[in-house]
Amino acid sequence: MHDILPYLPQLTVGWTACLIATASPGPAILAIIGTSISQGRRAGLSLAFGVLTGSYIWAMLTSSGLSALIRTYGQAIIVLKIAGGLYLLWLAWNAFRSAMRNGAAYESSQQSLPRLSLRRQYLKGLGIHLTNPKAIFSWIMLTSLGMPPGAPTGTMAVFIGGCMAIGLITFLGFALIFSLPPVHRGYLKSRRLIETLMACFFAFAGLKLLTARI
């Protein structure tokens, strides 16, 4: 522990950047919010755990030298970028279709369509994060900020552990807050506007991802 103390200032910078990046609105956060509001706490938490798992996977790959792999296998990142962009466009289409339904049609569709199981919610969250190459570069940026040169090996584990704790509190916090009954009632009143905004955001993020140079 004493070996890590000299590096705490730079670790703190990295953790602060992690908090800002994690809490900023993005596909994962919006999916957690939308699922928690419309389908309840358990569904939102399951999706949040999927996102957190995806984040942990990217963290482990980054600490294992992912930046070198990206330089070697750049084509794989392009394929991932296309898959992620198309997935976001698919989410946008689903949100847009839901927004076009009036109150009665929405209630009818919710009753007729089977709810996603908690396992499928988890896999949905995992898919959102694993198919977003921006998450890879976010972790590369975070490790560059938070990992001091020449730091002992255990420092990386401490840094990633801190980032995962931040992600756990942030993702699960969004799921818990937005699954509260007052928030759900507010969602029903403004559902069409919220889902339209979500559809626009997912479409924008998907198109930007497909056209971005990586």
Image: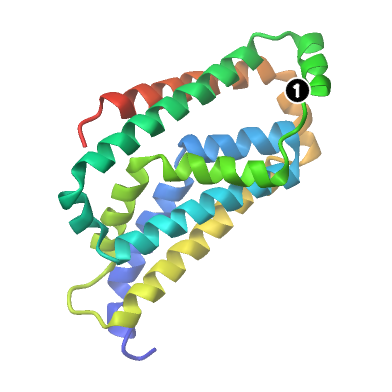
Say left or right for 90 vs 190.
left
Q: Quadrant of the N terminus?
A: bottom left
- Estimate how packed mark 1 is, as few (under 14), some (14 to 19) or many (20 or more) residues with alpha carbons within 10 Å: some
Please state the horizontal and vertical placement of residue 202, each as a whole percent of the image: 47, 25
The residue positioned 47% from the left and 52% from the top of the image is: 54
Q: Residue 81 at what x, y percent from top left?
A: 32, 34
- Residue nearer the viewer, 163 or 137: 137
Task: Looking at the picture, tell me which residue is in the foreground, 186 or 214.
Answer: 214
Q: Would residue 183 be visible to someone looking at this image?
A: no
Pick the residue in front: 204 or 10.
Answer: 204
- Judging depth in this view, the residue of 20 and 151 nearest the camera is 151
Tell me which residue sits at (57%, 15%) in the image. 96
In the image, 185: left or right of 60?
right
Image location (x, y in percent) of residue 115: 75, 32
Q: Which residue type carries mark 1?
A: Leu
Residue plotted at (24% across, 79% down): 151
Q: Identify the residue under disc 1.
A: 188
Q: Is residue 92 above or below residue 33?
A: above
Left or right: 40 as drawn, with respect to 168:
right
